[in-house]
Image (cartoon, grey):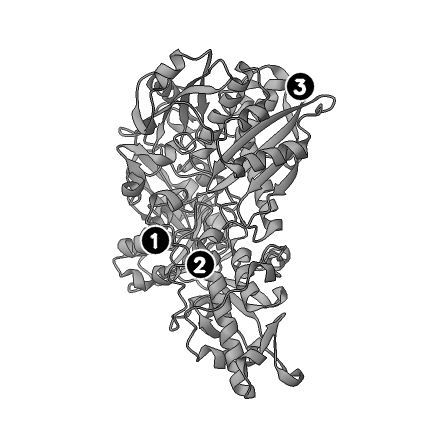
Amino acid sequence: MTATAISRRQFIVIGAGAGAGLALGLAPSAASATDTAARLNPFVRIGPDGVVTVIAKHLDKGQGAATGLATLVAEELNADPSQVGTEFAPADAETYKNFYFGDQGTGGSTAIANSFDQYRRAGAAAREMLVAAAASAWGVSASDVSILEGRINGPGGRQAGMGDFADAAARLKPPATPALKRPRDWTLIGRDFPRVEIPAKASGSPGMFGMDVQLPDMLVATVARPPRFGARLRGHDDADARAVSGVVGTVQIGDAVAVLARSTWPAIKGRRALKLDWDDARADRRDSEELMQRYRALAETPGLPTERNDDAKAALARAAKTVEAVYEFPYLAHAPMEPLDVTIRFDGGSATIWTGSQLQTPDQTTAARVLGIPPSKIDIRTMWAGGSFGRRGVPDSHYIAEAARIAKAWGRDQPIKVVWTREDDITGGYYRPAYVHRVRAGVDGSGRISGWEHRIVGQSIIKGTPYEQYIVRNGVDRLSVEGVQDMTYAVGALKAELHTTGEGVPVLWWRSVGHSHTAYAVETMIDQLAEAAGADPVAFRLAHLGEDPRLAGVLRTAARAARWEEPAGAGLHRGVALHRSFGTAVAQIAEVRMRDDGTVRVERVVCALDCGFAVNPDNIRAQIEGSIGYGLGAVLRNRITFADGLVEQQNFDTYEPLRIDDMPEVEVHIINSTARPTGVGEPGTPPIGPAVANAVYRATGKRITELPFSRHGLA
């Protein structure tokens, strides 16, 4: 998320489609400044060869956003998919802002929802302009000209490529309200549009990712940062580092030292050779268990009430049966395949930055502040990103600021690529916060949920950032309690409270943000309540969904596809979970088998989702498969722990992602919907943990309330 769940709920909400942004006169992005293509509007450029370039305002970090935006334009333009490519937009918040949170940025699974009307209008405007240009040249009425599969057609069998009239079209005034195609006439939206980046990825195209950037006279920098959060640098000796072949110098930037070299390996060797004197007087030196003990104690005391604060105590006193549980969730790293990297060139008056920028506006303004120049003098060239899961969308743009400080301290007009190693990334903080939940709930004599008390303890992601004013209400960070205060189910009385802790560990949104832990607590508790009521878990959920047909629809679809009411098969056990996040309802049923060594093997996951109209069904399926794999790796064995304040995990050997032989068969069912698109990149992650946990209970009789599963010998 990115600014993730900020969008629809807490930020300045501007109606989707407002300000379609078709004004001409946009300065070309640096990546395309020398081409001869005609710009029909800020989102569409057409070359003489008929190649259509869609300017993507959203970062594509593997989730397929660029392909989705290309689909929207190609549909209305009537382009052939084979002639459509994409390019990332320059940093220009006025033109390319995300309507949901005002800045230019990507997060909260909003890319398609935010751009659905805007990019269709851009394609439709380009189509009408091309038609008008061709009609004028041919001396015919615009009604006699059409575009089909990327070719312009006129009376008497006349044909032309779109590139033949692109220049003339670009000189026309864009229509204010271009006519959009009716959904029944769509030929590309709702079908499997090919991913635009696959040829480049498959061929290993150079320069695609930020880590690939190579420039003349470029230096590579690695940074020695404090080993404990809060430590200060008393002093350092860089003589041995400067003696490493290939190292050209070092610079101190606050409480860190950067080693600059001609290539990556000398920079790493030089950093290892530094002699560093750390002052740990202000550093956090606690172990993980000490922190969790404090969290458990806080969970036993009243916290700040959330917006939903009913008299659940009285309701629970009248309950026929009550159940309670304490849940513990560890810190989690994002661990994208491509660690952080930034290439910067600063000449004293302006700067160019190459990186997989997820929040271009904060990145641009932060770099400008550090360098002491106007934001307009910062040219951000957004690269494809090798994953993020929230890691590149940092409100304080700390890794951009660090690169800018290095460039400023170096003081030479020379490109510098700052490289984070995997160890830097996993030990460097900005984790999904650790949380403790204490839940007590009950059912009445008729099997209805009568009351629910839910107390959450953990750090705020948003406190201290510019977004705090929009998201924190009466001391409660909504990102900490989402999924509880707006619970999926109709509960008789709900009392939710929050303790926000002040740990020194930097934290950040992680794929699905608060839902990554709240869904687990809620959905495993729902199973316990169903058992207390003597009810089937699916039937119990359906009985508590109120008047929400979309939630009921995905649950029924998943249950039917998984054959829930039939025996699971020899050695197999099923568990179910249902959750709504980012506007999308998702139900998952997991089938697990216990291995002879006592560990769990997830064999199959059946998932149904309602994300509104499915723009690219194949990409949606891919996103759900990926989000299930990502979430499953976390619940099975991922955690960040501290010993004497030092992070114990370093790389994929100790922070182990899901392996290919652990990946279950995934079956995805997309509900046919005419509603506007909602999020897809994150909503598949929250239900997988509780679905597996509920299946493990059926297999072993053991409730897993402390993650990951590996702590219990189950993974």
The answer to whether the residues at label 2 and label 3 have Cβ atoms under 8 Å apart is: no
The answer to whether the residues at label 1 and label 2 have Cβ atoms under 8 Å apart is: no
Q: Which mark is residue 102?
A: 1
The residue wearing badge 2 is 57
Position of residue 212 measured from the top left corner of the image (x, y, whole percent): 51, 56
- SS class, disc 2: loop
- SS class, disc 3: loop
Q: Hey, which quadrant is residue 450 in on the image? A: top left
Nearer to me, 120 or 403: 120
Q: Amino acid at mark 1?
A: Gly
Q: Nearer the viewer, mark 3 or mark 1?
A: 1
58 left or right, relative to 258: right
Evaluate whether residue 463 shows in this view. Answer: no
Q: CA distance from mark 3 to mark 1?
A: 52 Å
131 left or right, relative to 173: right
| Number of numbered callouts drawn | 3
Q: Mark 2 or mark 1, which is nearer the start of the sequence? A: 2
Position of residue 523 measured from the top left corner of the image (x, y, whole percent): 51, 26
Nearer to me, 454 or 672: 672
Q: Amino acid at mark 2?
A: Lys
Residue extending furthest toward the bottom:
139
How crowded is the residue under tag 1: few (<14 C-alpha within 10 Å), some, or many (20+)?
A: some
Q: Mark 1 or mark 3, which is nearer the start of the sequence? A: 1
Position of residue 251 measured from the top left corner of the image (x, y, whole percent): 32, 49
How crowded is the residue under tag 3: few (<14 C-alpha within 10 Å), some, or many (20+)?
A: few
The residue wearing badge 3 is 597
